[in-house]
Amino acid sequence: MTPYYDHAGIAIYHGDCRDVLPTLSFQVVITDPPYGVNLGEHNGAAECRAGLLVKRGGYLDTPDNFSHVVVPALSAAIAAASRAMVFLVPPSMWQLPAPDAIGGIFVSGAVGRNRWGWSNLIHCLLYGTAPGLEKGAKPTAIAKTATAERTGHPTTKPLPWLRWAASLGTSDGETVCDPFMGSGTTLVAAKDLGRRAVGIELDERYCEIAAKRLSQEVMQFREPCMALLQNDPRPCGLDLGHAGQHAI
């Protein structure tokens, strides 16, 4: 397939991950898939295909669709990778293959209610073995207070969460795959860490959002001249022939 976006080791594919995944090579899966919670999107823009409810132009996040679409696709992605990190919530998470460990993000302000009280943990299912574990173990659950960037996607995760995941779960030279890319936060985090990454997204609107985020280059600044900071610009090559000519 032709990538929707392809630059500097980061690629986006617009399509159904069940079709795209078999064509890709990757070592790590890091993803925040649909949870099967619908979020009020069951409306007149939906139709029934093959017994599944589908939103015209995209995926409708119903419990049935989660079971019949997300679980098989995500299970195949996990099986094809050396390791995986999947952000999910109960009870949806129990439908996936049993993880080797469970970590996550502790959010002090709570992310909802359950039958015991407040829900404060964003669960992250961990598959395989962390890279570099022989050099020392790292926390598999952390506390974060960061908020998500406003991207136009309804469930964008905060970028620091995905940077933590990519830092914990990947090594230099590995390729990260996000089969449910959304607005591309996993790919941005991978790019920030110098990793290769590939994302798949069914809705073209979000492919465009992700492509724009990835196209934003960080401006590189030179290291400051220490002599200049000490109020002596001469070692920095500045001409002092005309007073006031070089503003600092």
Image (cartoon, rainbow, N blue to C red):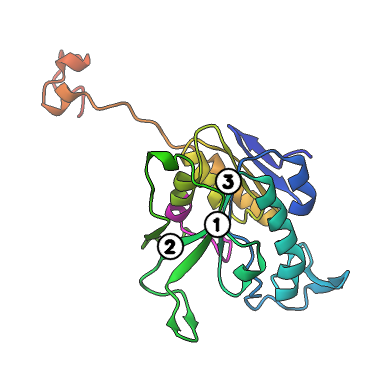
Amino acid at circle 2? Ile
The residues bearing labels 1 and 3 have C-alpha atoms spaced at a distance of: 35 Å
Residue drawn at x 21%, y 23% as measured from the top left: 225
Q: In the image, 203: left or right of 131?
A: right
Of the two numbered discs 2 and 3 on the same chain, state the one appearing first in sequence.
2
Amino acid at circle 3? Lys
**Which residue is disc 1 drawn over?**
100
Q: Is residue 32 magenta?
A: no
Point out residue 197 in the picture as x, y percentages from the top left corner: 59, 40
Amino acid at circle 1? Asp
**Which residue is disc 3 drawn over?**
212
Range covered by the magenta-colored residues: 150-162
Q: Residues within 10 Å of mark 3 (few under 14, many from 20)?
A: few
Relative depth, front residue between 51 and 82: 82
Q: Quadrant of the C terminus?
A: top left
Point out residue 151 in the picture as x, y percentages from the top left corner: 54, 58
Residue 22, above or below 246: below
